[in-house]
């Protein structure tokens, strides 16, 4: 009996290595594509996962490893850039040329580039024709609002900052304080960063009489001119035109509050309208361009690339990475992704049925301006803007002190960027 057991165990041990070797061989035969994305909502990620699974089914020799790092994305990518060890495919999240350009493969030879929306040319192409990334969608940011509330109180969508302030005061007064006029999810500092970044363009760029492009680029900008945005935000807070928990409120609360008719305006766009409709179809969310600040100026969209797929130029699987991009650029797949994100596609041959389609059509002649920080601020200023907003709302710093802080950080980060650039060129 003992000899029989030993013989049986020996056979098992002989068989197991063979099975393991067979499995290892099969796994090794598959090439793994690693993808990093900044997609943040469940609907966006679920659709991306579904299309990825369809790609894997079509390409049985390729496995795709998806990663959604969330708020850690930028830090993780900085580390990987420093080590020159990037994912096979990654999201340039608005920095296709400026931050990631030297790491991206040229995609100009791909068929979908024939249908690249011309509005994205200055953002995703250079003068020699290099295409830096495939745009999954394109952003047109403004103000999201509860159309029910504006209709109830007979308020026209604001076109100027004065109109906006008047609308907020009317909502507070007529709702007897039951509705938050302008809601911030300040626990995530990007909510305040978005406010500063979005309104900085009409304050400092679009009006010819207040154009500070040259000064911002050459480092001579007087940051006292930025104080206006902090003054306005602080005024809103004093008049209780923003939520009293603006510093601690979380993005996860937004959909439910909007669905309960407790919010009038917010900075959040994307899938908000669609997500609110899933909870309460009677609440209609609209989106409008960013209001003008100076007299005589016009509202603008703030936009450019939102989600992209760039291929790392040194990827050992560059061929497969391009195959994945080609798959995602198929009109049917591109349409699915655009609709999942509630934003227009980056391709002219794709017409997505998105929640804000009527609003985008209504404002189709409104100019689209690039994100302020991507053109005029050094790398790292987005976080500084967000922290500054938190400190202002928490009464840690005054509007004037905020401008002084921004001036110091702007100078420090510019010098840091110039030093790093010099080191990279050595």
Image (spheres, helix red, strand yellow):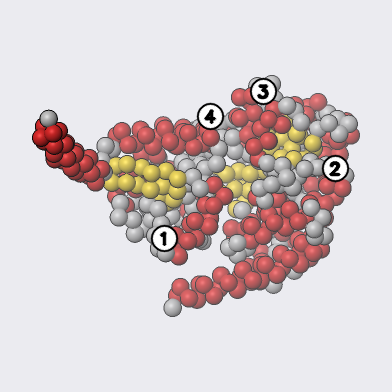
Q: Between label 2 and label 1, give the one nearer the viewer.
A: 2
Q: Which numbered disc covers residue 280? A: 3
Left or right, residue 159 beside residue 136: right
Give the image location of residue 77, x and y in percent.
Answer: 48, 57
Residue 229: quarter of image: bottom right
Give the image location of residue 223, x and y in percent.
Answer: 75, 66
Name the residue that disc number 1 marks.
Answer: 103
Indicate which disc, 4 or 3, sits on the residue closer to the N terminus. Answer: 3
Label 2 and label 1: CA atoms lie apart by: 46 Å
Query: Could you tell me which residue is drawn at 54 percent across and 52 percent down?
Result: 72
Indicate which disc, 4 or 2, sits on the residue closer to the N terminus. Answer: 2
Tag 3 near tag 1, CB within 8 Å: no
Query: Could you tell me which residue is drawn at 81 percent across and 42 percent down?
Result: 244
* Residue at disc 1, secondary structure: helix
Tag 3 near tag 2, CB within 8 Å: no
Tag 4 near tag 1, CB within 8 Å: no
Give the image location of residue 238, x and y in percent.
Answer: 87, 48
Q: Which numbered disc covers residue 240? A: 2
Name the residue that disc number 4 marks.
Answer: 353
Indicate which disc, 2 or 1, sits on the residue closer to the N terminus. Answer: 1
Query: Could you tell me which residue is drawn at 58 percent across and 72 percent down?
Result: 416
Label 4 and label 2: CA atoms lie apart by: 37 Å
């Amino acid at each position: 009996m003992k000899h029989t057991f030993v013989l049986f165990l020996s056979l098992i041990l002989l068989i197991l290595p063979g099975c393991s070797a067979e499995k290892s061989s099969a796994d090794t035969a598959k090439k793994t594509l690693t993808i990093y994305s900044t997609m943040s909502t469940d609907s966006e990620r679920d659709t991306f996962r579904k299309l990825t699974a369809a790609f894997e089914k079509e390409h049985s020799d390729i496995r795709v490893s998806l990663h959604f790092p969330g708020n850690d994305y930028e830090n993780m990518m900085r580390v990987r850039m420093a080590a020159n060890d990037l994912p096979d495919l990654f999201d340039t999240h608005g920095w296709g040329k400026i931050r990631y350009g030297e790491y991206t493969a040229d995609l100009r030879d791909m068929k979908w580039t024939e249908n690249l929306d011309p509005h994205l040319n200055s953002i995703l192409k250079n003068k020699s024709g290099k295409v830096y990334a495939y745009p999954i969608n394109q952003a047109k940011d403004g103000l999201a609002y509860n159309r029910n509330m504006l209709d109830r109180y007979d308020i026209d969508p604001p076109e100027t900052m004065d109109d906006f302030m008047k609308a907020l005061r009317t909502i507070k007064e007529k709702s007897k304080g039951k509705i938050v006029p302008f809601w911030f999810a300040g626990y995530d500092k990007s909510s305040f960063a978005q406010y500063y970044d979005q309104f900085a363009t009409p304050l400092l760029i679009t009006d010819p009489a207040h154009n500070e492009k040259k000064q911002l680029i050459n480092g001579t900008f007087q940051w006292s001119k930025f104080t206006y945005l902090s003054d306005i935000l602080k005024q809103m807070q004093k008049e209780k035109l923003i939520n009293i928990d603006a510093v601690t409120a979380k993005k996860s609360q937004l959909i439910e509050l909007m669905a309960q008719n407790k919010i009038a305006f917010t900075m959040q766009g994307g899938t908000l309208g669609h997500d609110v409709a899933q909870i309460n179809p009677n609440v209609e969310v609209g989106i409008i361009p960013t209001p003008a600040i100076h007299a005589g100026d016009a509202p603008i969209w703030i936009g450019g690339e939102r989600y992209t797929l760039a291929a790392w130029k040194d990827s050992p699987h560059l061929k497969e990475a391009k195959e994945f991009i080609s798959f995602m650029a198929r009109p049917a797949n591109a349409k699915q992704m655009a609709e999942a994100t509630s934003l227009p596609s980056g391709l002219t041959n794709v017409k997505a049925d998105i929640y804000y389609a009527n609003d985008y059509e209504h404002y189709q002649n409104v100019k689209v301006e690039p994100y302020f920080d991507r053109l005029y601020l050094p790398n790292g200023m987005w976080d500084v803007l967000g922290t500054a907003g938190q400190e202002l709302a928490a009464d840690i710093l005054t509007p004037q002190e905020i401008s002084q802080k921004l001036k110091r950080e702007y100078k420090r980060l510019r010098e840091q960027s110039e030093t790093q650039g010099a080191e990279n060129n050595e």
